[in-house]
Amino acid sequence: MAFAGLPSAEAAFVLDRAFGIAVRAGLHCCPEAHRVAGTIETGLVRLSLGYQTTEGDVDAAIAACTEIAVKTSAQR
């Protein structure tokens, strides 16, 4: 996912520090896909789910991402 006006590394830092959510940030495997998506300069944030991921974990991640998106769009 990408947050308008917020580099992926900064978004990952906020998710980690403010919400305790670990993610991967940057260019993931296929630079050409980033060129097509327009994220070659900023990268993307990737959430990974595992067998121990709970519905509550997913809900918390959605709420955190929504909060970041709202704050970054308000700053634009």
Image (cartoon, helix red, strand yellow):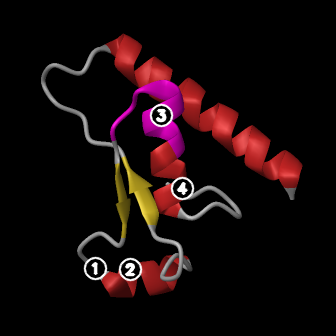
Residues tagged 3 and 1 counted as in contact (Cβ below 8 A): no
Residue picked out by circle 3: 17
- In the image, the segment drawn in magenta is 14-22
How would you rate the neighbour count of disc 3 (Cα within 10 Å): few for under 14, some for 14-19, many for 20 or more? few
- Label 4 to label 3, Cα distance in Å? 10 Å
Q: Residue at x 87, y 59 (%)?
A: 76
The residue that disc 1 covers is: 30
Q: Amino acid at mark 2?
A: Ala
Specify which label sits upstream in the sequence, 4 or 3.
Answer: 4
Residue at 29 percent of width and 69 percent of height: 28
Q: Main secondary structure of the magenta part?
A: helix
What whole-number distance in Å separates the C-alpha atoms at marks 3 and 2?
29 Å
Dot in front, 3 or 2:
3
Q: CA distance from mark 3 to mark 1?
A: 28 Å
Give the structural element (helix, strand or loop) at label 3: helix
The mark that comes first in sequence, 4 or 1, is 4
Judging by the rendered image, the residue that carries numbered circle 4 is 10
Residue 5 spot, x, y in % from top left:
70, 64
The CA span between labels 2 and 1 is 5 Å
Of the residues shown, which amino acid type is indicated by label 4? Glu
Q: Is residue 65 left or right of residue 21?
A: right
- Residues at discs 4 and 3 in contact (Cβ within 8 Å): no
Mark 4 falls on what kind of element?
A: helix
Q: Are marks 3 and 2 in contact (CB under 8 Å)?
A: no
Check if residue 39 falls in the magenta segment.
no
Residues at badges 2 and 1 in contact (C-beta under 8 Å)? Answer: yes
| Badge number at residue 18 | none
